[in-house]
Amino acid sequence: MVIPFALPFIDDEVVREVTDALTGTGWLTTGPKVRQLEEEVVKLCGAPAALCVNSWTSGAMLALRWYDVGPGDEVIIPAYTYSATALCALNIGAKVVMVDVGDDFNILPERIAAAITPRTKAVLPVDIGGWPCDYDAIMQAVDSEAVRAVFQPAGDKQRLLGRPLVLADAAHSIGATYKGRPAGTLADITVFSFHSVKNVTTGEGGIVCLNLPDPFDNQAEYRFMKVFALNGQTKSAFEKNQPGAWRYDIIAQGLKVNMPDLCAAVGLAQIRRYATLLLPERKRIFERYNAAFANYDWAILPPFDNAERSSSYHLYPLRIKGFDESRRDEAIRIISEKGVGVNVHYIPMPMLTLFKDLGFQMADYPRTFDLYQNEISLPIYNGLTDEQVAYVVEAVVEGVRVVVGCRL
Ligand SMILES: Cc1ncc(COP(=O)(O)O)c(C=O)c1O
């Protein structure tokens, strides 16, 4: 049996919606489908406004640029994440400050508090695997009198907020909740990814959810960001396409990161059924894995649900007690030989060439390394049958058994 690590959810409804973009509206770039997808996300997560973009990475860059973050500024991120969390800051000239994480894979609020300096302009917590960070504690760390007193604002937005921006990397966590509140409303700005392997996909894409506190006007900021995401151009091609509407202005040095309607159509067909079909299905698979691995004392099950938080079940990051990197890699080799696609989330950034060259050292993030060295992410996506889940479990159990037997 061959079981890929990830597969997008594509059914007749997705094909129908994409066909409508091709032959119904006939409009391929940003237009009515994008607007509908934004409305669906606003409905799903309750954020006051949401702007579709062409990736999480560009959405995060857009948000940081919107907040006037640039050279000389510091952005705090966890060491345990995908590199895009760092690259969105590096690519606009800001300095990345990495901190260690806790046992649940997520950034430690007390580490954020300790890393804040007068140059800190943003903090990017990451909801690893769809498990929300402790946002109340993060807000407390960032929104204290002491932090406000040393914050050095540059530009109107920074003066208005008066503290570092909390920009949630919710690439994984659409549909997750924290203290009864949905992801999308837990930080000042939240960006979801719609990349091909994510819970909802547009092939490539993302969405920026605005939840700025008073006195910001989220609708006004949405309108500005929409322009900013389109080269600073006051009208989209769709708007200019109306008879007599050809004239436009360029009002800011924006980015070009808008989402095409053709992509939005895929996500639109999925998101309408996300809460009722796609998310419960992921949860079901997650719980099957939990029930199976609870029988093995070497298995460390991932966080997923408690009185305070619920996951979006994006990843199933299983950990193997006592395994080091070489044993984990050997187990992966055996599992892969059985046709099961697995992955590691994540190779910590301080182990990657770019970040080593920037001076980051793995030894400074021991908890991150501990989590990485014995982690194996298992397939979890819509359409995975009970039989396939059982086969994955069998392959993992066999892989661990062989490695433990070999005493590598
Ligand atoms: C935690 C995290 N942040 C950011 C990203 C970047 O998302 P995108 O590919 O949409 O730019 C990813 C993608 O895998 C991710 O896993």
Image (tube, helix red, strand yellow):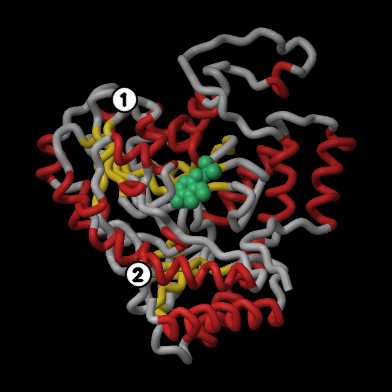
On screen, 49 above or below 272?
above
On screen, 178 above or below 401?
above
Q: Which residue is mark 1?
A: 70
100 on left or right of 88:
left
Where residue 55 appears, as percent x and y from the top left, is: 55, 39
- Residue in front for this viewpoint, 177 or 352: 352
Give the number of the mark in front: 1 or 2: 2
- Residue in front for this viewpoint, 95 or 144: 95
Q: Is mark 1 within 8 Å of ligand 1?
A: no
Q: Residues within 10 Å of mark 2 (few under 14, many from 20)?
A: some
Q: Which residue is mark 2?
A: 324
Work out which quarter of the rendered image holds the N terminus and state it.
bottom right
Give the Cα separation between the discs numbered 1 and 2. Answer: 39 Å
Type of the residue with mark 1: Gly
Residue 103 visible, this orientation: yes
Type of the residue with mark 2: Asp
User: How many marks overall?
Assistant: 2
Residue occupying the point 40% across, 36% down: 87
Quick check: marks 1 and 2 in contact, CB under 8 Å? no
Where residue 232 appears, as percent x and y from the top left, is: 52, 18
Where residue 283 appears, as percent x and y from the top left, is: 57, 73
30 on left or right of 335:
right
Q: Disc 1 on helix, strand or loop?
A: loop
Residue occupying the point 71% across, 10% down: 246
Residue 306 visible, this orientation: no
Residue occupying the point 60% across, 58% down: 199
- Residue in front for this viewpoint, 147 or 357: 357
Work out which quarter of the rendered image holds the C terminus and state it.
bottom left
Q: Residues within 10 Å of mark 1 (few under 14, many from 20)?
A: some
Q: Is mark 2 within 8 Å of ligand 1?
A: no
